[in-house]
Image (cartoon, rainbow, N blue to C red):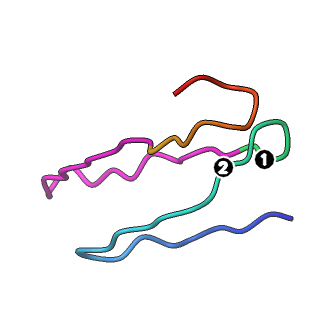
Amino acid sequence: PLKKITFKWNQIVFFVVQPGRRFHSVEEAFNPKKIRLSISGWFHLPHVDEDG
């Protein structure tokens, strides 16, 4: 399934990424008259067969 989320002011988006099951991409949001701050990161939990 494909889902496109239209960005809004002061918005935060969380989504689940499952190894081998999900592909994700993030499209550039650009406006020459505005400044954009983007913070990104990943939270990982170990899988049954992983150390951690």
Indicate whether 5 appears above or below 39. below
Q: Which amino acid, by three-letter code, is at mark 1? A: Arg
Q: Quadrant of residue 3?
A: bottom right
Q: Mark 1 and mark 2 in contact (Cβ < 8 Å)?
A: yes
Give the residue pinned by disc 1. Answer: 22
Q: Position of residue 33 (x, y in %)?
A: 14, 56
Decide if residue 19 is on the left or right side of residue 12.
right
Q: Position of residue 7 (x, y in %)?
A: 42, 70
Question: Residue drawn at (80%, 63%), measured in percent from left and top?
Answer: 2
Q: Which residues are magenta?
A: 24-42
* Nearest the eye: 32 or 8: 8
Q: Which mark is residue 17?
A: 2
Q: Which corner quadrant holds the N terminus? A: bottom right
Question: Residue drawn at (54%, 43%), measured in percent from left and top?
Answer: 45
Indicate whether 13 appears above or below 48. below
Q: Which amino acid, by three-letter code, is at mark 2? A: Val
Majority SS type along the magenta span: loop
Question: Residue drawn at (65%, 67%), measured in percent from left and top?
Answer: 4
* Nearest the eye: 17 or 25: 17
